[in-house]
Image (cartoon, rainbow, N blue to C red):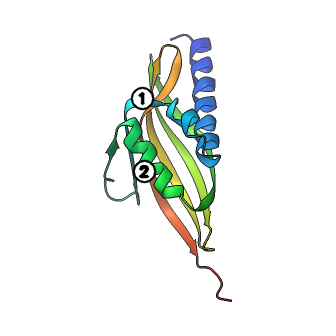
Amino acid sequence: MTDHAELVACYELTQAKARYCRTLDTRDWDGLAALLTDDVEFGMGDGHTEPHMTVGRDETLTLLQSLVAGSKTAHHVHAPEIDLNGDEAQVIWAVQDRAVFDSGLAVTGYGHYTERWVRQAGQWKLASARLAHLITDVQQPVAG
């Protein structure tokens, strides 16, 4: 890959990940589905043990929908470490995510996404994602 092609690929990957965060937070499930491979793998954990992985686009969307149900969320990613290899990329993103549930419970996680992206028909698609929360802050609802 030329230097120019690498820069373009890095830009495209950051745009794809930004779209992932936006579509998840706005509950644009069709938009999110368009970013995933058919056989995407997704798992969450504490960074110390290997997470259980959900396999498949529909299964992953169902899991994500259940995780954010009854909440408002904001996912912020930054400082990507991108390793390109042709039409495949390994990317680690620093992440901070927050969910505030209708019950008043609020959870803020800090950690990393470790991902594999593949370029299919000129578009980057998420093929594998592991979210590891290294720190989780939980705020219980105030009793009233």
- State the image quarter where residue 17 is shown: top right
Q: Which residue is mark 2?
A: 63
Under circle 2, the secondary element is: helix
Figure check: 54 above or below 132:
above
Q: Position of residue 125 (x, y in %)?
A: 48, 27
Q: Residue at x 60, y 24 (%)?
A: 12
Residue 126 is tagged as none
Residue 110 or residue 23, whichever sits in front = 23
- State the image quarter where residue 71 is shown: bottom right
Question: Quarter of the image containing the C terminus?
Answer: bottom right
Q: Position of residue 47 (x, y in %)?
A: 40, 57
Residue type beneath disc 1? Thr
Residue type beneath disc 2? Leu
Local crowd size for mark 1, using a 10 Å CA cut-off: few (<14), some (14–19), many (≥20): some
Q: Residue at x 56, y 70 (%)?
A: 137
Under circle 1, the secondary element is: strand
Residue 26 or residue 51, whichever sits in front = 26
Residue lying furthest bottom: 144
Left or right of 75, for residue 92: left
Q: Which residue is mark 1?
A: 37
Q: Residue at x 52, y 55 (%)?
A: 111
Figure check: 12 above or below 29:
above
Figure check: 42 above or below 141:
above
